[in-house]
Image: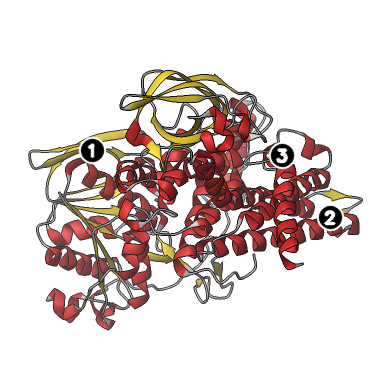
Amino acid sequence: MNIVVCIKQVPDTTEVKINPQTNTLMREGVPSIINPFDMYAIEEGLRLRERFGGRVTLLTMGPPQAKDALREALGLGADAAVLLSDRAFAGADTLATSTTLAKGVEKVGNVDLVICGKQAADGDTAQVGPGTAERLGWPHTSFVRKIHEVAGGSIKLERMTETGYEVVEMRLPAVITVVKEINEPRLPSLKGQIRAKSAEIPAWTAADLGATPEQLGLSGSPTQVVRIFTPERRSGGKILEGSLAEQLDFLVARLRETKAV
Amino acid sequence: MMEYFLTEEQKMIKDLARRVADERIAPAAAELDEKEEFPWELMKVCAESDLFGVYMPEEYGGLGGGVLEQALVVEELSRACAGVAVSYAASGLGAFPILLFGTDAQKKKYLPDIASGKKLAAFGLTEANAGSDAGGIETTAVLDGDSYVLNGTKQWITNGGEAEVYTVIAMTDKKKGSRGATAFIVEKGTPGFTFGKKEKKLGIRASATRELVFHNCRVPKENVLAREGMGFIVAMKTLDRTRPGIGAQAVGIAQGALDAAAKYARQRHQFGQPISSFQAIQHMLADMAIQVEAARAFVYAVAKSIDSGVKEFSKESAMVKVFASDVAVKVTLDAIQVFGGYGYMRDYPVEKMLRDAKITQIYEGTNQIQRNVIALELIKEYAGRK
């Protein structure tokens, strides 16, 4: 089974501070970690490889220092890692990121399954996994909490919902995003870390991916951030007391007073 | 911690052992202690992280390190639970006789599985009437055809019952005294080899301490380590090499106690201020830190010296074991004092640390026997100077 796990390097949110003026993350000097949700994606990739054989390739789009994240993940036992890095990728929103990752998956070639964490701890959009599937034209299932089986060119899994779970079967190749309930990520091994230290990590550019500049980075990103703000705190509600008639009177009076009716 | 100029690989080993300790061992420590349960799941974590191979040569699947690498792991694991750490370390104690004295065939047969953590090892020397006086061993081994027949009982064997590979010292010629002992490799499952009662202990309660019972147990001749009559040399050379590991265990326990005490002292308020603002507490913490760092520096220095290939190190190995274990008992005792009444309760981790620390003054040669060894070496040295 040929598996690609997409990971993202994010600021360690336990260390991050918010700039009170701009309400944006202050990233300077904050250590980077692998997005915690991606740790479950890596673990699931490794477990599937243990069950069905094959190969786990890690993929990330980012600046050269994102290689650190790939090296750390290689220490857990992944077979290979590729960095997608180019100035042209900078400023990408979830659409442009999905496009870039999808091109990367296509270039890896013969991929059966792409696994992503359910969302990144910095952007929290949960769009890149499904977006990548759309760009690839593959089916996807998000919030996967268990993989039942992989057989006959399809995968059967459990998808977490707000009220319970759904059992989904879809054909491969496909994309899944996983939740933390799916497994307990392993610790690295010393031999894995030693191997990872000297592992070759190729960096693929926009040209390597054969992507046109309009699809990538800032120019491929229709998302416009107009304003970032903290929503105003809602004032606490009021619980009405007394008899039903008293409560009704109060309510009607209040509605009129606030010109709601 | 001070800068000890560890290599990049040694730092990697220490960091990973620390993660294993913090993320896996620490959350389980109190329950393992309470239930006196052997930590198989944690042994598996150590195995998957390659920790069992740090001191093994690469040709047997290890990472090619030595006594220092093993000490770094033992120290970190002991910070979280000495019972788990000793289960890890005792496998090394069982493996060292093979590593030091085994033939190529014996090494190839046994070491790879021990290095990978697939199998645990154990070392059997102590008996009911042979503790500090190892010359009192009563277990016998009699050559009969192509095998030796073992009879007798070993006592207080760490990893007893759980390990697959045992290195056992038995008398092949009682008349020759200490020159009549021989070391054997005995596999679990060999007919006539069973396990006696599991001991109930003061501390290191997660670890298994059990009797090894040999009743007409046939061990093939090719399982003799070194030669017949070399048993005591095998045992002494092994223990010289593993005593710094006891030192590392002691340092780890003491560091764990200091960490807990310092953290608590900052949180606990009395008379309207944290107790860490009182000089009485500050001086205790300072003394604890001085001792822990001195013990650590000593352990690393002796381990490095052994790994550098020096020939004689019985004295230093004994010294570091004595020093660090005395530190561990004193520091854990003081940690309880910093905690006050809470420290005496099982809800907090420091009373366990004292219980765990105590054994380091006793096993692998009591501190009194170590002082004998040190004094004897000293007298020999000074006699030579004239």
Q: Is residue A19 left or right of residue A63?
A: right
Real-space Cα separation, disc 2 to disc 3, in angstroms: 20 Å
Residue B55: x and y, percent?
Answer: 44, 54
Residue at the extreme bottom? A87
Taking the spot 20% from the left edge, 37% from the top edge, the residue there is A168
Provide the residue designation for mark 2. B284
Query: Which of the pair B211/B33 is nearer the observer?
Result: B211
Q: Is residue B191 left or right of residue B137?
A: left
Q: Nearer the viewer, mark 1 or mark 3?
A: 3
Does residue B258 appear in this view?
A: no
Quadrant location of residue A198?
bottom left
Q: Determine the secondary structure under disc 3.
A: helix
Q: In terms of secondary structure, where does tag 1 sit? A: strand
Name the amino acid, label 2: Met
The residue singled out by tag 3 in the image is B358
Where does the image place residue B292, in percent across and percent down from the top left? 71, 57
**Residue at (56, 41) in percent of width and height:** B86
- In depth, the one of A212 and A107 nearer the eye is A107
Pinpoint the chain carrying mark 3: B
Of labels 2 and 3, the one closer to you: 3
Q: Between tags 2 and 1, which lies in front?
A: 2
Residue B28 place in picture, x, y as percent: 55, 37
Mark 2 or mark 3: whose residue is earlier in sequence: 2
User: Mark 1: which amino acid?
Assistant: Leu
Residue A148 appears at what percent x and percent y?
A: 23, 35
Disc 2 to disc 1, C-alpha distance = 57 Å
Report which residue position mark 1 lands on: A157
Amino acid beneath label 3: Lys
Report the label total: 3
Tags 2 and 1 on a common chain: no
